[in-house]
Amino acid sequence: MGLESGGEVESLVRALGGECIEARENAQRELLEIGESALPALRKGFESTSDLELRTRARTLILRLDRIERRLDLTQA
């Protein structure tokens, strides 16, 4: 997937707390595909909201993407 604009990534992060479960799941899947470049927006979204659904999904993605990033670092070392 190509590099998404910051606004698009932030919109996906906001969608993690949306009303529709399908929209939340689609946003989570897209953010995972975007990869580590989504981490700053995910961290910002996690830290700036009290929405439990958004925080839970953002935290899950942050942990998952951090693990992927660390594995890549180890294979390149």
Image: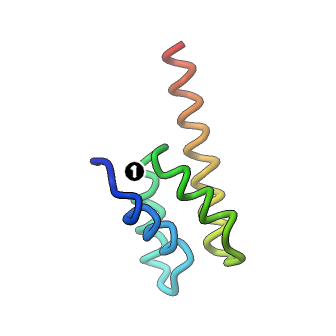
Specify the quadrant of the image occupied by residue 29.
bottom left
Q: Is residue 8 above or below residue 69?
A: below
- Outermost residue on the left side: it is 2
Q: Which residue is the site of mark 1?
A: 33
- Outermost residue on the bottom side: it is 19
Task: Identify the residue at image location x=33%, y=55%.
Answer: 4
Residue 60: percent from left, percent from top: 63, 56
- Outermost residue on the top side: it is 77
The colour scheme applied to this rendered structure is rainbow
Q: Quadrant of the C terminus?
A: top right
Total labels drawn = 1
Left or right, 73 with respect to 59, comes to left
* Foreground residue among 48 and 35: 48
Q: Is residue 36 above or below residue 22?
A: above
* Foreground residue among 64 and 45: 45
| Secondary element at tag 1 | helix
* Foreground residue among 44 and 65: 44
Residue 56: percent from left, percent from top: 67, 66
Task: Identify the residue at image location x=39%, y=50%.
Answer: 33
The amino acid on which the numbered mark 1 sits, given as a three-letter code, is: Glu
Q: Is residue 19 above or below residue 68?
A: below
Left or right, 16 with respect to 54, comes to left
> Badge 1, how many Cα within 10 Å: few under 14, some, many 20+?
some
Task: Identify the residue at image location x=39%, y=59%.
Answer: 30
Residue 27: percent from left, percent from top: 44, 67
Residue 35: percent from left, percent from top: 45, 46
